[in-house]
Image (tube, helix red, strand yellow):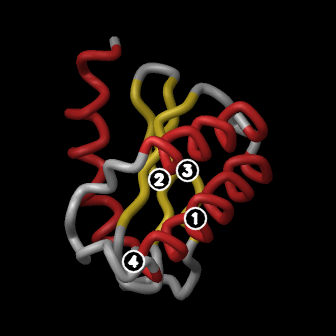
Amino acid sequence: MKELNPFILHSSLDIVEDIQWKTSQLYLKTIDNFYGYYISGFLTSGNIKFLLIHETKNEESIRQFFNDLNDLYVKVLLNPFYKVNDAITSPVFDLKVKGFAKKYL
């Protein structure tokens, strides 16, 4: 199943782009599902899309995960050495995202 995750998430981008013009919310909740897996979305104020594929339906913990992830992403953007639209290659960023996943998911 893991090998299909990029394709599932990529197909959900179309749904996110449809929804983003119909709501003012950043957290889009569950936008799609695929064989028992749910896809949730989040839009940053700069129109960056975060997608999460998960098995649980706990909307509150997923919302908190996305809010903490957004805060961390904003801190990366404020770094004067980061160039917008470059890949985030920081191992610290990766560890913090994994910590958020353990905490909320």
Counting residues from the start of the chain, the first of labels 4 and 2 encountered is 4
Q: Is residue 54 above or below residue 3?
A: below
From the viewer's perspective, tell me whether residue 7 is left or right of residue 42. left
Asked if marks 3 and 4 touch (Cβ < 8 Å), the reply is: no
Seen in the picture, residue 4 relative to 12 is either above or below; the reply is above
Which three-letter amino acid code belongs to the residue tagged 1? Leu
Which residue is outermost to the front?
81
Other residues around mark 2 within 10 Å, as few (<14) / some (14–19) / many (≥20): some
The numbered mark at residue 55 is none
74 versus 3 height, above or below: below
Q: Which residue is mark 4?
A: 20
Q: In screen coordinates, is 42 left or right of 11? A: right
Q: CA distance from mark 4 to mark 2?
A: 11 Å
| Mark 1 or 2, closer to the camera | 1
Pointer 3 or 4: first along the chain = 4
Nearer-N-terminus badge (1/4) = 4
For mark 1, what is the residue?
72
Image location of residue 23, percent across then percent down: 50, 83
Three-letter code for the amino acid on which mark 3 is drawn? Thr
Secondary element under disc 3, as helix, strand or loop, is strand
What amino acid type is highlighted by mark number 4? Gln
Of mark 3 and mark 1, the one earlier in the sequence is: 3
Give coordinates of residue 56: x percent, y percent.
67, 30
Q: Earlier in the sequence, mark 1 or mark 2?
A: 2
Q: Quadrant of the C terminus?
A: top right
Q: Name the residue: 25% across, 77% down.
A: 84
Q: Of the residues shown, which amino acid type is indicated by label 2?
A: Ile
